[in-house]
Image (cartoon, rainbow, N blue to C red):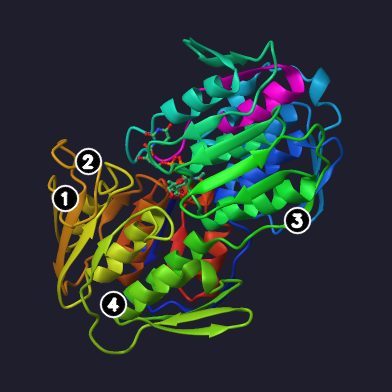
């Protein structure tokens, strides 16, 4: 969306009611766009959301010689025929807020023999190192040079299949392996892989392109490198993180939202927790209806985890609903070490939330005893009051929006532009759902 103003004034207290439609997942679409570099022929991607992360990747592809066109809403044509002759000037200007540039490495090394990656963006919810990515690329045979302005890579002897064991099932590092191994010489065996639905959909795309990828049990993925890949034609998996966000919004505002395009299989874990909180849902062929039960919500204990666990990106919006539940809820964040910055604003609005350095849960966690506020205790029910809030990150921003929508009185929420990284036309959707707000600027 084109947000002219970056601030929205919200009059809270109106339940969100109505229907919205999802498009493809931010966490798949951007990677699918990168995969198009690997094809010898053009690709077509459908259900592409109009979000800023997609625009950033489009800009990067343009710099690398991939011609991206769209003659129909939500459909991208990606033509990589000119990648070999592309230059890399101005790449920094296009890096924007996204973390995707690091995933260009494998495809560019295959096509050009070198790659330059600017500093990465993405939400500041932890340190977010890229050590697994660099180590994996070195294992394939890349030479990695760190420069003040970014990272330069080359592969003078090509890339060769390898055995990789990730220390943690990182989504990005798993995608790095996939996007590199499909055209590497020989077989790659990846252990400790992430298996999020968006990764499975990326595998679907790569298979359409001609790749040979086997997904085994116990987080093992085997890839047989091939010499040539073609373009793909694909409809992206729906955005389950956006679906979970609107589901949380329905609970927090005592509303009723039909999320068109949401599907049960990718949301099983979320739906179980939603039901435990007391949220109601009806699963239909074309989406899921999420609604408040009309009675008191229940507290829950959640530990975020890699798939098939409770996704970290669902946590922030759900915490707002938990401020309305009767009793004590606990959220142990085990994926990112600093994902509770957003609760300060909720506390200012009247929520009772304490964050702790201890692991409040049985899940093995990398952050215990390391001075990170990564567990939250939410006591409710509390009534939120309107406040002036500055949005810190994507999901934290959405949670601030729904806190303001559920609060008594007026809130002024600024820096909302960041929300358009991952939520297509969210202002239009808020309007469709009957929210009472004014956009400044
Ligand atoms: C664009 C995209 O798809 N973003 C998603 C992706 O982010 P992203 O791919 O960046 O997340 P990862 O799964 O890689 O990160 C998980 C954990 O591994 C750590 N790590 C990761 C890489 C590395 O080289 N070294 C390292 O230590 C991270 O700091 C983090 O603590 O998966 C996350 C976890 O499901 C989601 O929250 C993000 O929405
Ligand atoms: C953390 C997120 O995204 P990114 O990895 O793109 O910063 C998110 O989508 O919540």
Verify CB contact (< 8 Å) between mark 1 and mark 4.
no
| Spatial CA span between label 1 and label 4 | 22 Å
Q: Which mark is residue 234?
A: 3
The percent coordinates of residue 431 (x first, y second) are 52, 70
Q: CA distance from mark 2 to mark 4?
A: 26 Å
The answer to whether the residues at label 2 and label 1 have Cβ atoms under 8 Å apart is yes
**Residue 313 sits inside the magenta stretch:** no
Q: Nearer the viewer, residue 7 or 168?
A: 168
Q: Earlier in the sequence, mark 1 or mark 3?
A: 3
Q: Residues within 10 Å of mark 3 (few under 14, many from 20)?
A: some
Query: Where is mark 4, residue-wise?
Result: 277
Give the magenta range: 102-123
Q: Badge 2: few (under 14), some or many (20 or more) residues near its Cα, within 10 Å? A: many
User: As displayed, is residue 429 above or below residue 325?
Assistant: above
Helix, strand or loop at disc 4? helix
Q: Disc 2 to disc 1, how far (Cα)?
A: 8 Å
At numbered mark 3, what does the secondary structure look like: helix, strand or loop? strand
Camera sees residue 398: yes
């Amino acid at each position: 969306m084109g947000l002219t103003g970056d601030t929205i004034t919200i009059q809270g207290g109106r339940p969100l009611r109505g229907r919205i439609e999802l498009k493809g997942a931010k966490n798949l679409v951007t990677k699918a766009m990168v995969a198009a570099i690997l094809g010898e022929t053009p690709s077509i991607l459908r259900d592409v959301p109009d979000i800023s992360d997609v625009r950033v990747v489009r800009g990067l592809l343009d710099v690398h010689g991939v011609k991206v066109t769209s003659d129909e809403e939500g459909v991208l044509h990606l033509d990589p025929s000119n990648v070999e002759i592309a230059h890399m000037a101005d790449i920094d200007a296009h890096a924007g807020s996204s973390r995707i540039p690091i995933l260009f490495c494998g495809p560019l090394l295959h096509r050009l023999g070198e790659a330059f990656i600017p500093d990465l963006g993405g939400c500041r919810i932890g340190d977010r190192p890229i050590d697994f990515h660099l180590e994996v690329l070195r294992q394939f045979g890349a030479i990695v040079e760190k420069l003040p302005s970014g990272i330069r890579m080359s592969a003078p002897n090509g890339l060769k299949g390898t055995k990789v064991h990730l220390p943690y099932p990182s989504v990005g590092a798993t995608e790095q392996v996939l996007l590199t191994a499909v055209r590497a010489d020989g077989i790659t065996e990846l252990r400790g892989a992430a298996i999020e639905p968006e990764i499975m959909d990326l595998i679907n795309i790569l298979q359409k392109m001609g790749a040979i990828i086997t997904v085994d049990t116990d987080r093992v993925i085997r890839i047989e490198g091939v010499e040539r890949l073609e373009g793909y034609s694909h409809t992206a998996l729906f955005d389950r993180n956006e679906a979970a966000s609107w589901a949380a919004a329905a609970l927090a505002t005592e509303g009723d939202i039909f999320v068109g395009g949401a599907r049960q299989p990718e949301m099983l874990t979320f739906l179980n927790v939603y039901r435990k909180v007391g949220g109601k849902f009806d699963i239909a062929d074309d989406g899921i209806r999420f609604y408040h039960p009309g009675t008191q919500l229940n507290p829950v204990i959640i530990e975020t985890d890699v798939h098939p666990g409770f996704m970290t990106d669902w946590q922030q919006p759900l915490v707002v609903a938990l401020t309305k539940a009767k009793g004590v809820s606990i959220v142990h964040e085990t994926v990112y070490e600093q994902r509770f910055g957003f609760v300060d604003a909720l506390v200012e609005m009247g929520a009772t939330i304490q964050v702790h350095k201890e692991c409040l849960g049985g899940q093995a966690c990398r952050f215990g005893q390391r001075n990170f506020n990564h567990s939250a205790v939410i006591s409710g029910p509390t009534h939120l009051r309107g406040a002036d809030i500055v949005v810190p990150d994507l999901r934290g921003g959405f949670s601030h929006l729904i806190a303001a929508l559920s609060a008594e009185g007026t809130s002024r929420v600024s820096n909302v532009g960041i929300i358009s990284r991952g939520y297509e036309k969210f202002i239009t959707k808020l309007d469709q759902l009957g929210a009472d707000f004014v956009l400044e600027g």
